[in-house]
């Protein structure tokens, strides 16, 4: 199988530093050699490729923007975005694993945890020795996380948690869950460890999307945790939402990778598939589709690059992240569907990655904020008028 050369119509590589290119190329090679050869097997079986965890950890792909004192790579945000891009070119499930471990578990522990919590968990999570998950979404509260009904009650020496979470990536695999619950009506973060009495994480089955990702419920029935397991660095819904901004940033980059994989597949197919005595790439309608695909990829790449530069400068706003997540996920799914059409009936075979990416992107459009919610976030930002209800 030929190595992926990338999609770079506007010479965006010239805007990247040597370190950023090195990170991107290293992960690109990792995906070509370790993810793509095995991912269809796992997608069919509905299993996550656990053999990748140690390899990703060895490359510094978990918590990669966090300080070296915790065993992390201290990458800038553009390099981290390029990591997410290449991992999702392999499969959304692989990017999701790394994204949750980094943005939704290590980040809140780093930002809101105690020094003891950071020293205990971050090195283990960075090495892949421990796996984490993030428990915010509930069966009845997705786009409205403030309505959560999971509750924490303080006792003399700890807390009792009751509630349920749903659609939790890595939940069944996780050694620690970052659980968001209301304590006296205010949202707080708690660390709940695997094996704690009353805590269970059954895997959700029957998915047509993200089949190589472990998606779980989290059930908390009179779960006691000690006081040291509460994240002490703040309270309120703004805490989990700040974590979601980190994850959404990675998704904006990741979807570009899925789109590039679909475009490259469609382009190569169109140049070699002969119909009416010539390759289908010679037909105007096929060229129109390919041009549209590469144009949207280029626009998404530029959105991501400037977003990353703003993030590294400490100037990014969450509404800008919403715009990039909204745009890039939408057009990546559009590109996957166009690629499937170019491949014709062959497009439904898992000999090609297109249908798998298309199915995965249906979920990516929905999780970490639906397309519609990101539309309303940007809409409020530009008009000053909230239109959520």
Image (tube, rainbow, N blue to C red):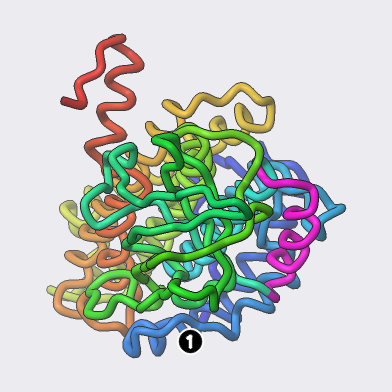
Q: Is residue 313 left or right of residue 337?
A: right
* Residue placed most toward the observer, 131 or 328: 131
Q: Is residue 259 left or right of residue 333?
A: right
* Residue placed most toward the observer, 73 or 299: 73
From the top left corner, tell me how far across and down residue 384 is, in percent.
Answer: 31, 9
* Residue placed most toward the observer, 91 or 113: 113
Asked if residue 124 is among those painted magenta in the image, a careful observer would answer: yes
Instruction: Establish if 121 lies above or below 236.
Output: below
Q: Is residue 123 left or right of residue 327?
A: right
From the top left corner, tell me how far across and down residue 381 is, in percent.
Answer: 35, 16
Asked if residue 85 is among those painted magenta in the image, a careful observer would answer: no
**The residue tagged with tag 1: helix, strand or loop?**
helix
Q: Is residue 24 visible?
A: yes
Q: Which residue lies most toward the right here?
A: 69
* Residue placed most toward the observer, 380 or 226: 226
From the top left corner, tell me how far across and down residue 218 is, in percent.
Answer: 38, 67
- Residue 215 occupies quadrant: bottom left
Q: Is residue 87 visible?
A: no
Residue topped by disc 1: 38
Instruction: Establish if 287 lies above or below 208.
Output: above
What residue is at 33 percent from the left and 13 percent from the top?
A: 382
Instruction: Establish if 189 lies above or below 281.
Output: above
Quarter in which the C terminus is drawn: top left
Residue interval drawn in magenta: 112-129
Q: Is residue 19 left or right of residue 307?
A: right
| Mark 1 Cα-neighbour bin, 10 Å: few <14, some 14–19, many ≥20 | few
Q: How many marks?
A: 1
- Residue 385 occupies quadrant: top left
What residue is at 47 percent from the left and 29 percent from the top?
A: 318
From the top left corner, tell me how far across and down residue 43 is, in percent.
Answer: 36, 82
What residue is at 70 percent from the left and 76 percent from the top?
A: 129
Magenta-drawn stretch, dominant element (helix, strand or loop): helix
């Amino acid at each position: 199988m030929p190595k992926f050369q990338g999609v770079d119509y506007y010479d965006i590589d010239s805007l990247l530093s040597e370190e950023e290119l090195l990170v991107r190329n290293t992960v690109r090679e990792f995906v070509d050699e370790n993810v793509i050869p095995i991912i269809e097997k796992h997608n069919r079986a509905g299993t996550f490729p656990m053999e990748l965890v140690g390899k990703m950890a060895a490359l510094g792909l978990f918590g990669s923007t966090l300080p070296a004192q915790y065993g992390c790579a201290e990458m800038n945000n553009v390099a981290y975005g390029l990591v997410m891009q290449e991992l999702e070119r392999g499969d959304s499930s692989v990017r999701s694993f790394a994204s949750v471990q980094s943005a939704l578990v290590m980040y809140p522990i780093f930002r809101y945890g105690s020094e003891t919590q950071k020293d205990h968990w971050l090195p283990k999570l960075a090495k892949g020795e421990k796996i984490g998950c993030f428990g915010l979404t509930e069966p009845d509260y997705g786009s409205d996380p403030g309505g959560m009904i999971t509750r924490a009650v303080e006792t003399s020496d700890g807390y009792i948690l009751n509630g349920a979470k749903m659609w939790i990536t890595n939940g069944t695999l996780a050694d620690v869950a970052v659980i968001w619950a209301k304590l006296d009506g205010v949202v707080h973060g708690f660390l709940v460890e695997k094996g704690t009495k009353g805590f269970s994480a059954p895997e959700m089955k029957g998915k047509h999307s993200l089949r190589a990702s472990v998606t779980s419920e989290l059930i908390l029935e009179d779960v006691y945790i000690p006081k040291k397991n509460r994240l002490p660095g703040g309270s309120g819904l703004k805490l989990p939402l700040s974590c979601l901004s980190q994850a959404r940033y990675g998704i904006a980059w990741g979807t570009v990778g899925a789109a590039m994989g679909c475009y490259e597949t469609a382009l190569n197919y169109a140049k070699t598939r002969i119909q009416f005595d010539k390759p289908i790439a010679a037909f105007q309608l096929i060229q129109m589709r390919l041009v549209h695909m590469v144009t949207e990829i280029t626009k998404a790449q530029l959105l991501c690059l400037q977003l990353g530069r703003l993030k590294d400068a400490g100037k990014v706003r969450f509404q800008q992240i919403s715009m990039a997540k909204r745009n890039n996920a939408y057009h990546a799914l559009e590109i996957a569907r166009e690629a499937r059409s170019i491949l014709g009936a062959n497009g439904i075979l898992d000999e090609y990655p297109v249908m798998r990416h298309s199915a995965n992107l249906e979920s990516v459009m929905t999780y970490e904020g639906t397309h519609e919610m990101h539309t309303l976030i940007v809409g409020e930002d530009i008009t000053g008028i909230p239109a959520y209800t």
